[in-house]
Image (cartoon, rainbow, N blue to C red):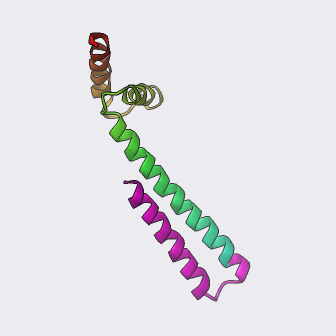
Amino acid sequence: MASNANNTKKVILFSFVAFFLMYNRLGFINRLLFCTIASQGLIFFTKCNYYKKCIDELNYEMTLAGQESRILTMYYFSDHPELNSFKILCEKYKEHSLNQ
């Protein structure tokens, strides 16, 4: 998944470099500002999606990091659609950690 995100980031940057070099109707500074702001916005959007997928996968892991992820998700996103399953997984993890 990480290499896919890096590849997407490289494609976004390459496409904006191509736009910057080939589109001549705007001035130099306007092209530079447009390319910088638009490419960084798209990279931020891609990173947000990547981290969201990581957190969603981590929520179902029966590890300490998964437990922390579930607790933080329940705390910050109290209207999350899978809140009940996170509560059940938290209880299962507590039982699992007590049995070890």
Q: Quadrant of the C terminus?
A: top left
Q: Residue placed farthest to the right in the image?
A: 29
- Verify whether residue 8 appears in magenta: yes
At 58% across and 67% down in the image, what residue appears? 38
Does 87 sit above or below residue 69? above
Q: Position of residue 71 (x, y in %)?
A: 42, 25
Residue bounds of the magenta highlight: 1-30
Q: Position of residue 56 (x, y in %)?
A: 35, 40
- Verify whether residue 68 appears in magenta: no
Towards the viewer: 3 or 33: 3
Does 62 sit above or below residue 32? above
Q: Quadrant of the N terminus?
A: bottom left
Displayed quadrant of residue 92: top left
Q: Residue placed farthest to the top in the image?
A: 98
Q: Is residue 4 left or right of residue 29?
A: left
Displayed quadrant of residue 19: bottom right
Does 41 sit above or below residue 33? above
At 52% across and 60% down in the image, what residue appears? 43
Most common SS among magenta residues: helix
At 49% across and 56% down in the image, what residue appears? 45
Towards the viewer: 84 or 68: 68
At 54% across and 81% down in the image, what residue appears? 18
Does 3 sit above or below residue 93? below
Q: Total marks drawn?
A: 0
